[in-house]
Each structure stands twice: as C-alpha cells, then as structure tokens.
Amino acid sequence: MTTLPLPFDGHSVSDATRAFLQRDHLLFIDGAWRDASGDGWMETRDPATGLVAARFAIGEAADVNAAVVAARNAFDGGWARSQPATRAALLRRLADLMQRDAQMLAELEVIDSGMPLFIASLTVSNCTAMLHYYAGLAGTIEGTTTTPPAHVTHDAEAITYTLREPVGVTAHIIPWNVPLSMAVLKLAPSLAAGCTAIVKPSEETPLTALALADLIAEAGFPAGVVNIVNGTGGTVGAALAGHPGIDKVAFTGSTATGRRIVEAALGNLKKVTLELGGKSPVVVMPDADLALAIPGVAMATYFLGGQNCMAGTRIFAHADIHDALVDGLVAFSQSMVVDHGLAPGCQIGPMVSPAHSAKVMGYIARGLSEGAVLCTGGERLDRPGSFIAPTIFTGTTPDMGIVQDEIFGPVMAVQSFDTLDIDAIAAMANNSPYGLSGSVWTTSLSSAHKIAARIRSGHVSINCHGAVAHNIPFGGYGQSGWGREFGRESLDNYLETKAVTARL
C-alpha cells in the first residue's frame, strides 16, 4: 500500500507510530484480530497533507453479529458477575499501558484528526485519569434497603433491597473529532459497571481505537469484553443501533444522526444516550476583564479548530466593550499558529477532511451573502491539507445561518447587545435549538451566577469556557442530546436497578 512519507511534513514520529501505521488494520472481535467478512478497505489520511496514513478493513452487518455474539458470551460467561476489584485492576492496567504508549497514541491522534500535539498529549493524559476514576467507582456500585410493602408485612416479616446490575451488551459509536477520548469516556464507565462493549470508531479517524484494542488485549481483559468493528455509519453504525442483541447504545455526533439512532433503537427499546450538536453562547458583559476574556473567548471558538461540540461560536458582546473585544479577538486570531499538528507551537490544525473543509467554507460564503461583516480570515490557507484561517464575523443577527447552525469550524459570529437586563440577555443566549455548553465573562459575581442559572445548557462556565473533566457531568438540553457523560452519572447509564422483596 502507499503510506504517508516520513517525516510528516518535515516532522518526525516515533518508531512505534511508524510501525503501527504500516500495519493492515483488521477488526478486533472476541479477543483477536480478524478479517472482515467482506473485502472492503478504506484509507485514512493525514488532513494536514492529504496523504494516506494507513488502511483498515471495513466491517459489515455480519461482523457486527459476530461481535454481538462475542460480547454476549463474555457478559453471560462471567464478566457481568466479576468482582469490582477485578474490573478496577484491569482498568488501571489499561491506564498504565496507555501512559507507557502515550507518545504513539498522541502522534496517531494528530496524524488521523489533525489536532495539535499539545491537545493530543493532554487527551491521552485525561484518558488515563478517566480510567483510574472509573476504576475507583467500580467498587462503589451498591444497592440500598428500604421498607417492604405493607401488604407483605401485615402478617409476616420481610426485607426489601435493591441491586445495581450491568445493563448488558453496549454499543459505542465514536465521532471523528477527539476519537481516543470519546472511546475511553464511553468504555470506562461501561466496563466498570460490568457491561461488555462493541466500539465503532469513525471511518475518518479509526487509528487510536485500533491502537487501544492492542492495549486492551495486553491488559488482560477477557475475550469478547471489548470488540472494535471498523466501518461506515450507514452499515456498521446502523447495524449496531438496530441490533436486537444490544441492550444500550451510546453515541456522540450530529443531531441528525442521533435521531436516526433513536429510530433504529425502537425495535428492542434499547437504552440510548446521545451527546449531540451544540452552538454555545459566550456572553461578555461590560465589566469583563478583557485581558482574560480575549484569549478565553478566542479559544472557546478555536479549540480543536472549532471542531468540537461545545465550541463557543455565538459571541454576545455588550456595546460598551464590543469594539475593544473584537479588536482584541482579531489580533489574537491573526497571531495564531495554524500548522501541521506536529509542528512546534501549533494552535490550530487542519479541518478533518476536504469535504468538511468545503462545508465550513460554504458557511463562510453564506455569512457573507447574508450581510455579516468579515473582520478576519474567511479563506483557505495556500498550502496542502484542509486548513482554514481563524474567522470572525460581526454585525450578525439571530436569523443568520452562521449564528443558528453548528458549523464545526473556526468561525466566530459576534452580536452586539446594549441591555443589562439579565432575562433579556439569557433570552438571546437561549435562542438556539441546542443547549450543550456556554460561558459568561464578567467581574460581577451576581451577574455571573444569575446568567449562568438562566442559560439552558448542560454545562456553563464563568470566566472560562469548556471547563470539563472526568468527574464533572457533561451533556445537553434540547437538541444537544439525552443523558450525561463523565462523573457518577455516566456510570449510572450502564446500570439497571432491581428491587427484591423477600417474605421471611
């Protein structure tokens, strides 16, 4: 096969990364690598150069069936009844192996998705912390006792207690923007609860999920507990969502795809959690500390090149500081290092693919046609790869496509407001079908908490943005999804509650 020339755009990678990319990547089912049932293969490309990085087999519905059988056999064969200490030890062992291979995992994230290396390295570190966190929670799964029903106790003694039991076989459909983190944040609570899992990585960025499978096997997880089935959403994703042998599906991705997963899940009424789109509001009050707000607001939009669901791309700037804020944001944007993710100092990498780059550029053209004022950016960079300059529009209005739609790119839409009425400000912020994240920038403690309380989002930050961590529940209101990930709430997603009453 044709593989990406090394070094990558002038940047070297580790021998381990080089060796991994040279492999033909298969499906990981029942503890072993196996060929797909069909003969389909796909290539993944470095989005910073457009060159082929690796190739991988594409699964079919028959491969999903095989993975479900393996996962069910592992669940019924002892994993569901395994001791929490056993599951915790395996999760901690996996965390240690990820830390050992941190450089390779980070480099694969960069090569596959285009993210800057400093973000990829932070991602690996966060994943190991997440595994340790859920390893700790595995030992806290417990039921309660409660008062037995009166019709049982009127003539006898009785006891009523509850049990927390694993849901069963779970499917995890992973997006392309932060693939390693998205896989681990779903797998860790699922495995801690005693579930078995089938993971479908995005066909755009499958590499770190495949690398993770190697480490899962090395850590000693029993065969069938974790299975990785590469493939397209229309084939493998649809087969997972509709499969009667799967008890729960967890999905992160677009709202449109989330709706299709819900429809497919109706067959056996499987449990569903969805982390979907966002169009997060960023409210900058007239008393905001601009030295803090300018870089903070800029990175709220530009983190991961805007290719993240909690990106703060609707900027509400009070008229008193609007011009100063915009001037600062333009200067910050123009100073950012846009480069290959392996380049030293890179702050923004490429869009994940030429198709996605074209979509983002389409929104930029739409913004111009609808009358928004382009202050900076708005163009592709003249170099190989799918690079778009950080882009700022002002003079935007709530009805514009760049204000209402999730663009998933480095595009900021600034609106000016002149009121101090808290309810009016919240109404502007809530003028969206989404409700995933948001932030408020002010030096007033009162204003900060009043606005945060009124924003209809699952996660709101004050004088920062996107303050997420493995212990903090994360999820959305409205069309941003169902349920929560991270924290104790995520573990609860993978547990059933059974009540038992015994007449004594």
Image (cartoon, rainbow, N blue to C red):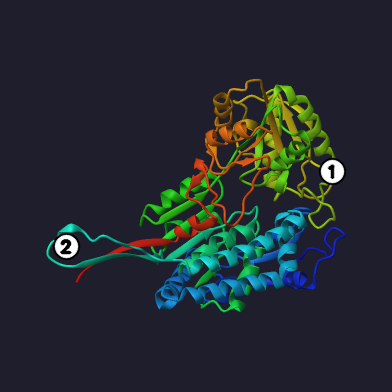
Quarter the C terminus occupies:
bottom left
Looking at the image, which residue is at 66% across and 73% down? 97
**Helix, strand or loop at mark 1:** loop
Residue 362 numbered mark, or none: none
Earlier residue among tags 2 and 1 = 2
User: 68 or 120, which lies in front?
Assistant: 120
Label 2, label 1: how far apart the Cα atoms are: 77 Å
Looking at the image, which residue is at 76% across and 36% down? 294
**Helix, strand or loop at mark 2:** helix
Write down the quadrant of residue 13 in the picture: bottom right
Write down the quadrant of residue 183 in the picture: bottom right
**Rendering coords of residue 416 (x, y %):** 68, 24
User: 90 or 142, which lies in front?
Assistant: 142
**Rendering coords of residue 419 (x, y %):** 63, 20
Callout 1 amino acid: Asp
Q: Is residue 220 visible?
A: yes
User: 62 or 189, which lies in front?
Assistant: 189
Callout 2 amino acid: Val
Q: Is residue 79 left or right of residue 305?
A: left
